[in-house]
Amino acid sequence: MDLGIDELEQSLDLPQGFFDSLYNEDDWSFVIKLHSFLEAHLSMVLAEALNKSALDSFTHIPMSNAKFGKAVIASAIGLIPKDMETFIRALSEFRNVLAHDIRNVGMDLESYYRNQNKAKKASLYKKFGFGLRESGGSEETNKVLFENRFKRAIHLSGLATVYHLSKKSLEIEMNRLNIEVAMKEKQIKELRDA
C-alpha cells in the first residue's frame, strides 16, 4: 500500500520502503523512527499550509508541547483532527521516554502493554488506538485488536496519520493551483476588457 508514501520517503531522502519496514524493527527503533518520520512529514505539511520558507523553523518546534508543539498548531489550524493530535503527542512523549534512557533499548511493546493496569490500558487505547478507530471496525473489535497487537495498532495509527497528512498536502496544493488559475483568468479577463 503506497498512499504517496514512496514520494514522501523520496522527498525526505529516505530509502524506499522505509515506512513499511518500520514494523519489522525492534520496538525501541520502531517508536523512535516512526516518530521521526511523522515529525518530518508534519513539519513539511505545516510549512506548506503556512509558509513554505518556514520549514526550517518548523523543524525546531517541539512535537508534543501542549501549548506550542507542532501537533497542537496543526490541530488549531485544522490540518489534523483532535484524536490525531492526541496520538502524535502521545507517540512523541513515549519516544522521549524511550530515547532519553538507554535502558529502554530492549523495550517490548506487547509486554509493556500487558503489564499495565486497566486504567492505563484504557488510556493507551485512547491515545494510540486512533488508527484502529479510523479503520471503521466496531469498538469491541478494535479494542481486542489493540490488546493483542499493540505495536501493530501504533503502526496503523502512524499509517493513518501519514495518509491524512498526505491528503492535506494534496488539498493545500490544489487550493494553491486553483488560486493561481483564478488569478490568471482574472488577468486574462482584464486584458480582454482593456
Image (spheres, grey):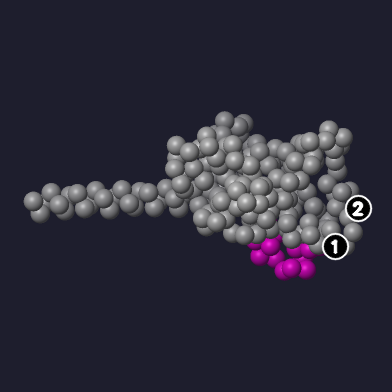
Q: Is residue 75 left or right of residue 141?
A: left
Q: Which residue is rendered at x = 17% and y = 49% of the image?
A: 188
Residue at the extreme left of the image, as rendered: 194
Is 144 placed above or below 177 here?
below
Choose between 57 and 22: the one closer to the eye.
Answer: 57
Secondary structure mostly seen in magenta is helix
Estimate the x, y position of residue 118 in percent, counting from the top left. Answer: 88, 62
* As drawn, 99 above or below 163: above
- Looking at the image, do the residues carrying marks 2 and 1 touch, with CB atoms under 8 Å apart? no
Local SS, label 1 = helix
Q: Residue at x 74, y 68 (%)?
A: 139
Which residue is at a point 76% across and 46% down the rendered structure image? 94
Q: Amino acid at mark 1?
A: Ala
The residue closer to the viewer here, 24 or 121, is 121
Query: Is the residue 73 above or below the residue 35 in the image?
Result: below
From the image, tell me which residue sits under label 2: 115
Mark 1 closeness class: few <14, some 14–19, many ≥20 residues within 10 Å = few
Marking on residue 149: none
Q: Residues within 10 Å of mark 2 (few under 14, many from 20)?
A: few
At numbered mark 2, what does the secondary structure look like: helix, strand or loop?
A: loop
Q: CA distance from mark 2 to mark 1?
A: 12 Å
Range covered by the magenta-colored residues: 131-144
The residue indicated by pointer 1 is 119
Residue 7 position in % (x across, y down): 53, 39
In the image, is residue 8 part of the stretch drawn in magenta? no
**Residue 86 position in % (x across, y down):** 67, 56
Does residue 9 appear in the picture of this structure? no
Residue 12 is at least partly visible in this image: yes
Left of 27 or right of it: where is 70? left
Q: Residue 175, position in %: x, y?
A: 39, 52
Which amino acid does the dot numbered 2 rest on?
Answer: Asn
